[in-house]
Image: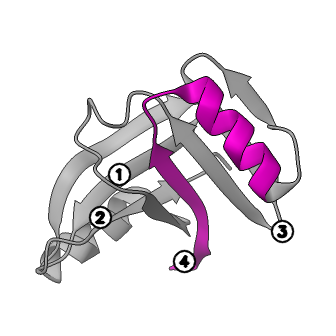
Amino acid sequence: MTSGQKTVITPVGDLAAAKALYAALLGVQPSVDEAYYVGFDVAGQHVGLDPNGHKSGMTAPVGFWHVDDIRATVDALVAAGAEVVQGVTEVGAGREIAKLKDADGNVFGVLQDPS
């Protein structure tokens, strides 16, 4: 069902400042460096900075579990008690994400890359 939690997206107010801080922390330059998103790939993980995250309701970093079939996974999670926060959305290059929350209000994501 999942190959692990490999992506963490953090909402940021000042993208340039956050990019400098995370580059220093991670010791690498961004693999994606756009006005709408900055991402770093390090140690098998992707760390993303989303300057629009706060506007979409993100209040903290969100970990994303990589899955093979995002729609089936979302359906199974809802059946198990999760609540959809953001339905399946294509975010570029065929990558799809969804955000859900558990019964305690903890937000988590699922992510499917194109085949």
Local SS, label 3: loop
Circle 4 Cα neighbour tier, 10 Å, few/some/many (<14 / 14–19 / ≥20): some
Let me know if residue 21 is in the magenta part. Answer: yes
Mark 3–mark 2 distance (CA, rounded to whole Å): 27 Å
Mark 2–mark 4 distance (CA, rounded to whole Å): 12 Å
Residue on which the image places disc 1: 98
The answer to whether the residue labelled 3 contacts the one labelled 2, judged by CB atoms less than 8 Å apart, is no
Mark identifier at residue 43: 3
Task: Determine the image quadrant of residue 46.
Answer: bottom right
Residue on which the image places disc 2: 74
First to last magenta residue range: 1-25
Residue on which the image places disc 4: 2
Mark 1–mark 2 distance (CA, rounded to whole Å): 8 Å
The answer to whether the residue labelled 1 contacts the one labelled 2, judged by CB atoms less than 8 Å apart, is yes
Could you tell me the amino acid type at mark 3? Ala
Q: Is residue 98 above or below residue 108?
A: above
Task: Determine the image quadrant of residue 83.
Answer: bottom left
Sequence-earlier tag: 1 or 2: 2
Local SS, label 4: strand
Could you tell me the amino acid type at mark 2? Val
Q: Is residue 7 left or right of residue 50?
A: right
Which residue is located at x 43 percent, y 48 percent? 97
Percent from the top left, x then y, of residue 14? 50, 27
Q: Is residue 23 left or right of residue 74?
A: right
Let me know if residue 71 is in the magenta part. Answer: no
